[in-house]
Amino acid sequence: MSLSSYTSSRAPRIGVLGAAALVVAGLLTAPTAATAVPAPPRIMAALGDSITRAPLADGPTAGTGINSWSTGTTPSVESHRARLTALGGSPVTAYNVAVAGTTSSDLTRQAALAVGYRAEYVTILSGANNVCKATSVASLPAVDEFRTDVASALKTLATGVPSAEVLLLSVPSLQAVLDAGKSSRSAVSAWGTLGTCPIMLADPLSQAESAVQRRSAVETRIREMNAALATVCASYATCTYDGGAVYGNHPALADLSPVDYFHPSLSGQARIATITWAEVLDNHLFTDAPAPTQPTPEAPQPAPAPEPAAPQPPSSGSPSTARWTIDETSSKLAFAGSWRATRSTRDSGGSVSFSASKGSSFSLTFTGTRVSVVARRTPSSGISDVSIDGVPVGRIDGYAADTEYQSTVFASETLPLGEHTITVTVSGSRAAASTGHNLIVDALIVEVPQ
């Protein structure tokens, strides 16, 4: 059975360096005026499947959308529509064009409807049906096809309503549904009777190797699909990906409908609304971001003396080191090749730049004795080459099974005090488990003796 047989404002990042620390002409950059924050939308649209259509949330009723996390009017759900109305002070017109039982292949059609309604805000939650309609591990949805479907929908929106903010949500974890209901006889019985998403929920109590491997393969494919969502969304300036927030949601039994123990109940819809609204706030889609401020270098810390001697304070002649962070938006970074940007409050300064094109690179000329690279590591990150002053010094493997933010992926050896240039280049290679070749730069950290 499919998901229903029932009929993530933006303030610019300013890369700022201390003039006393980095002896490069013109390094201190004045903050620019913040980008105007879009007013709360007057018209919104919701794309997707039955999770957004919200059938069975309050019992065996048709999915009219009144209980939807996105466009619903049920007070206890506190939908995005309700929160936007409160934020803007006037009613929001909402169109729920999600269709129960559909896969991502229907998103472009739905997006065209949103364009016709002149939507100013669009939510997209799709992909679970792609997985649930698989009859075996071999027939799990192809990531490339899923990516193409979503990209087509985003292109339709970008062309038809170019200023509309789009919140693209991750595919939910089906293992989390299994975990929530497997201890309930009613849930296990309902899954068997209704044939609900058998690729995950068939034989829910079995610990046979084949069952365990089947479930693991499903979750792996969902994570790969979510990595594709992150990449596609990053191609559009008005698209915000939730960073895996929906995938990371682990519902309680009460958050599942008592009819099929699969679709969200009223509390489940409210939970999705809360989790996803946090992405709207965190990414400042319709609210002001805090004003950017000049960063302060970390205070030097004295190294403790080896045991058993008591720690001694540094002598008056002991050197100290200041550390300075240069965000990837700084004009002091030079980018070559094809680069795009994407945003998350989990990143240093709120955004990253990324490229998957072999030969694309970024470089920084600095004065100091050490330099480190901070990146976002993801399932779709590849391997990049690092050189300092034209000499190869190492490689960066950005792959991680789960996304890691503000990860130090490279730290140089101690360099002679003076001017140096670090260059990081997309190699076009990747780890065996990676699904892509992305280099995702967040910031660089330069150390300078005081």
Image (cartoon, helix red, strand yellow):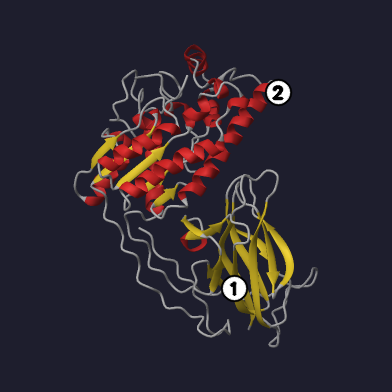
The image quadrant that residue 7 belongs to is top left
Name the amino acid, label 1: Leu
- Mark 1 closeness class: few <14, some 14–19, many ≥20 residues within 10 Å: many
Query: Which x, y percent locates residue 199?
Result: 57, 23
Frontmost residue, 362 versus 321 = 362
Tell me if residue 297 can be seen. Answer: yes
Q: Quadrant of the C terminus?
A: bottom right
Please say if the residues under marks 2 and 1 sit with CB atoms less than 8 Å apart.
no
Question: In the rendered structure, which amino acid carries the disc numbered 2?
Answer: Glu
Q: Is residue 342 left or right of residue 53?
A: right
Secondary-structure class at tag 1:
strand
- Classed neighbour count for the residue bearing mark 2: other residues with Cα under 10 Å, few (<14), some (14–19), many (≥20): few
Q: Measured from the top left, where is residue 376 in percent x and y?
A: 57, 55
Q: Residue sitting at 57 percent across and 40 percent down?
A: 224
Q: Which residue bears the numbered disc 2?
A: 209
Where residue 291 sits, quadrant-wise, is: bottom left
Q: Which residue is mark 1?
A: 364
Which residue extends farthest right? 308
View extreme (top): residue: 193
Residue 373 found in image quarter: bottom right
Disc 2 to disc 1, C-alpha distance? 51 Å
Q: Please tell me whether residue 278 is drawn above or below residue 215 in the rendered image.
A: below
